[in-house]
């Protein structure tokens, strides 16, 4: 009986804090991002300390409160914060690694965002993807008007715009997945330190300099690269979209491999950490070169050579 009373008290306090943060996200635009990021914390804390069934019940109540107090905007916020908070707390309760937390949170964000798109289409007849493409077209149109007024409009401007929009549509899934992983990382960066302060056991990541992809990634990257060069895909087909997005994902992973090698080299040389961070920022315009460095590191185990030579 005492235990049930404690669960109810924890549940009520969790719902109160979650509702407050959700209302901040909905009604206070200046603090909206803060509320959006912090709203996952009470849900995660409750799941980390209580059973999955109790946490699911609390999550359903959180969704209902979001609709009652925040309307449709509250629903859209809760569709992200409630499942993300639940998954973070579930991973912590099950003693999962931070890599698992990152992947599970990213997948949850992908599913939650797709749910938002479907709900928007079903309730309001609004296609968010079409709206985004329309905004991009309007931006290109405004740029064209400015260039025309300055007498700098290229003759093939419309063709350039059409080609750019087609390319964007092709790589959109890859960018979407990348953005979801970055967003998941931000959620974890914000939530985990707070949960640690609340006495929830938090796993630790290995240092970024130890980031290492499986060597098989090189072969996958080689196969996809050959397909992109030698394959004959019709424009806009699923085959072309799959190859373009796979190439984007593999290059992003190999870029991380290259950056981790830079951090490893700085560490082995005993150079300051801020130098590695500054070099990482500077490396962004040289993205392709860093990808090549990542390929060489993965294929020839450069960091093993660096580790050996630094000890001499």
Image (cartoon, rainbow, N blue to C red):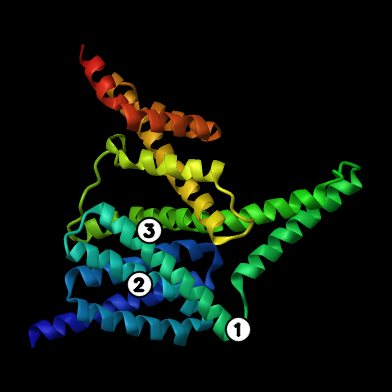
Q: Which residue position is annotated with label 2?
A: 83
Q: Residues within 10 Å of mark 1 (few under 14, many from 20)?
A: few
Visible residue check, residue 282: no
| Residue extending furthest toward the top | 312
Mark 3 and mark 1 in contact (Cβ < 8 Å)?
A: no
Q: Earlier in the sequence, mark 1 or mark 3?
A: 1
Mark 2 and mark 1 in contact (Cβ < 8 Å)?
A: no
Q: Is residue 30 left or right of residue 190?
A: right
Mark in front: 1 vs 3: 1
Label number found at residue 237: none
Residue 124 percent coordinates (x, y): 60, 83
Q: Which residue position is annotated with label 3?
A: 187
Q: Is residue 153 left or right of residue 77?
A: right
Visible residue check, residue 135: yes
Q: Quadrant of the C terminus?
A: top left
Q: Which residue position is annotated with label 1?
A: 124
């Amino acid at each position: 009986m005492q235990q049930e009373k404690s669960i109810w008290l924890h549940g009520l306090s969790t719902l109160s804090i979650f509702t407050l943060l959700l209302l901040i996200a909905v009604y206070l635009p200046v603090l909206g991002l803060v509320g959006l990021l912090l709203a996952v914390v009470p849900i995660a804390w409750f799941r980390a300390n209580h059973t999955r069934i109790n946490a699911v019940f609390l999550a359903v109540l959180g969704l209902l409160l979001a609709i009652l107090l925040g309307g449709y905007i509250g629903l859209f916020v809760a569709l992200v914060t409630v499942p993300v908070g639940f998954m973070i707390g579930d991973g912590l309760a099950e003693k999962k690694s931070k890599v698992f937390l990152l992947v599970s949170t990213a997948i949850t964000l992908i599913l939650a965002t797709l749910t938002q798109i479907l709900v928007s289409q079903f309730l309001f007849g609004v296609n968010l993807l079409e709206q985004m493409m329309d905004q991009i077209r309007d931006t290109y149109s405004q740029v064209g008007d400015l260039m025309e007024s300055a007498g700098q409009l290229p003759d093939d401007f419309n063709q350039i715009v059409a080609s750019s929009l087609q390319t964007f549509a092709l790589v959109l899934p890859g960018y979407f997945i990348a953005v979801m992983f970055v967003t998941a990382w931000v959620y974890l960066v914000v939530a985990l330190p707070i949960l640690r302060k609340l006495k929830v056991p938090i796993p630790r990541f290995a240092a970024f300099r130890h980031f290492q992809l499986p060597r098989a990634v090189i072969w996958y990257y080689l196969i996809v690269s050959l397909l992109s060069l030698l394959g004959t895909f019709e424009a806009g087909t699923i085959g072309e979209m799959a190859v373009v997005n796979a190439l984007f994902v593999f290059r992003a992973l190999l870029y991380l491999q290259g950056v981790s090698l830079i951090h490893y080299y700085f560490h082995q040389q005993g150079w300051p950490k801020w130098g590695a961070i500054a070099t990482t920022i500077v490396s962004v315009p040289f993205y392709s070169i860093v990808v090549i460095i990542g390929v060489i590191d993965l294929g020839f185990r450069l960091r093993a050579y660096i580790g050996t030579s630094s000890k001499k």
